[in-house]
Image (cartoon, helix red, strand yellow):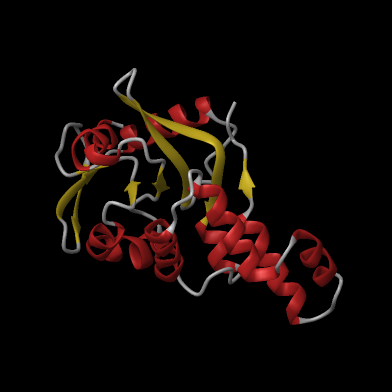
Amino acid sequence: MFRLKMRFQYEYAEDRSRVRMIGLCFARPTSALAKSEIFPQLPDWHYRSGSHIDFFFPGFTDFSKEEGALELSMPGRGTWYYSSKFFDTFRQQIERKTLWKYSGGNDLILVNARYREDLEEPEVDFSGAIVCQLDSMKDSKAFPSVEQYFESIFRFAEETSDRDPTWRFSDRKALSIGGSALQRVALSLLPGGIGAEVEKAKHFAVKDIGR
């Protein structure tokens, strides 16, 4: 998390005490969804996310340090390199630290990060993570497109003043789909389209994946 540390120490120096939302996006270059709906958006997302949220793509760098790394032309972002070894190393690290297991597709983990002044290091809190399996969410029509879902994340991160932003994002998404937990259960008993809307809400559940 060297880049996250640099962000806290330099770009966020005036407000390092603020809890920040970060996204870990496990998206491999062979993925059809990543190629069609994630990678083409990176130039816009780079500016849209601003100082409100940081996204990290395991396995990707803008410089090559690994023999056999795949060279990729990222739209509007120049040449990137993808290392299967780096991707899998990061996957193993997160799986050792948490209860999350990589799905094999496009997984997005939204978590909170805080800066530890005593350690001069960022600390990532996985206890209130939102785990999103983007492929299944798209298939079940939980969102119209990945682009629109990410916009809702950017908008929330831009507007929130909560000390624990990932929890609030999940709560807000659930409310926008089906209301309270009791309401969602009641709606699920109904036939037809309303029950289908409730099915989408499960994708936005906050999961404690911390060990």
Tell whether 47 sits left or right of 152.
left
Residue toward you, 119 or 130: 119
Q: Residue at x 31, y 40 (%)?
A: 59
x, y (%) of residue 43? 22, 62
Classify the position of the N terminus by image quarter.
Answer: top left
Residue toward you, 194 or 183: 183
Q: Residue at x 76, y 59 (%)?
A: 181
Tell whether 149 sits left or right of 61.
right
Tell whether 106 sits left or right of 197.
left
Residue toward you, 141 or 71: 141
Classify the position of the C terminus by image quarter.
Answer: top right
Numbered-mark total: 0
Q: Which residue is drawn at 39% across and 50% down?
A: 27
x, y (%) of residue 76? 16, 63
Farthest residue in the top direction?
118
Q: Quadrant of residue 117?
A: top left
Residue 8 vertical placement versus 79 (above, below): above
Q: Quadrant of residue 99?
A: top right
Residue 80 vertical placement versus 176 (above, below): above
Farthest residue in the bottom direction?
192
x, y (%) of residue 12? 25, 41
Tell whether 201 sits left or right of 103.
right
Residue 211 vertical placement versus 61 (above, below): above
Q: Which residue is drawn at 47% across and 31% down?
A: 94
